[in-house]
Image (cartoon, grey):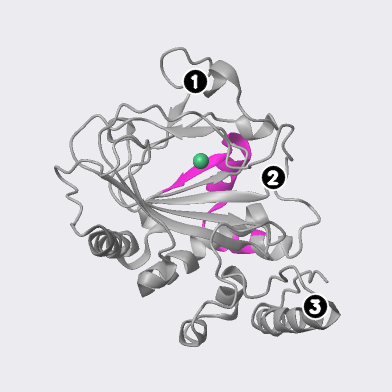
Amino acid sequence: MVQIAARTEVGLDHILKEIDDLGLNSYIEDLDTNGYTVIPPEIANPNDLAQRVLDASLNVAERRNGERPDLKDGNSRNPNSPVGDAQKAILLENQVFEEALMNPVLLAVSTYLCGYDVVLSSMGSQMKGPSDTRFLLHTDTRLPSPLPRLPLLCKCIYALTDFDRERGCTAFVPGSHKWDRNPKGSETLMHEGGSVETVPAEGAAGSLIIFHGSTWHGAYNRVVPGLRASLHLLMMRSMLRMTEDFYDRIPEEVLARNSARFAILTQQAIIPAYLDKEDQHAKVMRSLKYTDAFEKESGIALPVKR
Ligand SMILES: [Fe+2]
């Protein structure tokens, strides 16, 4: 236990207790050993969250694309992409996406990996149909090797439809998060010509897959009709540059209906690059407003960067 998380992580005792309270110890052991875990619906899917996220994701795709995805018989709108049709930046499209971010199970595991100052970098849905486009194995930590052992980021994937090999689920190389490097050459190939073994992340709709940013992964091609639907959250330490920009862009009523932690997660406490001393002061004060509220709520003091 506690192999991945830094022993000096702020609030480590607090998060380990939360993991214990939520019954997540065996999933944390999976993460430590294999670099990924699949948390089943009975734990990860409170109040039919995945079904509601699926409905909202279909609505977003229909509104943006002009046609509703057909889960049963549909094809990818983007068959040349191994991830199918991706809808980016959907957090503010429906309140259920706030709920998906605030799921205590997702937050406990993300916090274990990336600390209490972890933020949402991006949230998007994917609808993936049959395709023979190869998805190369890679890590999500966009750095040259060697990679840091301490996770800088993690990916959380809600399976909104059943995930198994023939339905095109995520593929992992177990234990690769401990190799501290990116795959290269034939190591990037799945199936034919590949030199590493992959394992399918299988689980019923409502499962939550979470993996360390240095775990080698890709996805199997879907070989049966219809679409695989999923919601992807990239979570990262607040010192990194995020993919989607939520800073000062979340409406007040959305902040007000959520906990103080939601503001931290949606980047309100980060301190972006400043122009001068005055600008720096304003941005630090803004950050303190949100970190103070979080500290009051949780009893955990976040490190503030000045
Ligand atoms: Fe990836």
Query: Could you tell me how far apart the alpha carbons at marks 3 and 1 are, in whole angstroms?
Result: 49 Å
Query: Could you tell me how far apart the alpha carbons at marks 3 and 2 are, in whole angstroms?
Result: 34 Å
Q: Is residue 267 above or below residue 23?
A: below
Tell me the mark number nearer the camera, choosing from 2 and 1. 1
* Residue found at the very far front of the displayed protein: 275
Crowd class of label 2 (few under 14; some 14 to 19; many from 20; radius 10 Å): many
Label 1, on which residue?
197
Crowd class of label 1 (few under 14; some 14 to 19; many from 20; radius 10 Å): few
Check if residue 233 falls in the magenta segment.
Answer: no
Q: Amino acid at mark 3?
A: Gln
Q: Quadrant of the C terminus?
A: bottom right
Secondary structure at badge 2 equals: loop
Label 3, on which residue?
280
Q: Residue 26 placed where, x, y %?
A: 54, 46
Q: Residue 269 placed where, x, y %?
A: 67, 74
Q: For the residue with label 2, is its CB less than 8 Å from the closest atom of ligand 1?
A: no
Q: Earlier in the sequence, mark 3 or mark 2?
A: 2
Label 2, on which residue?
4
Q: Earlier in the sequence, mark 2 or mark 1?
A: 2
Query: In which quarter of the view is residue 261 placed?
Result: bottom right
Q: Is residue 40 above or below residue 224?
A: below
* Residue found at the very far top of the displayed protein: 193
Crowd class of label 3 (few under 14; some 14 to 19; many from 20; radius 10 Å): some
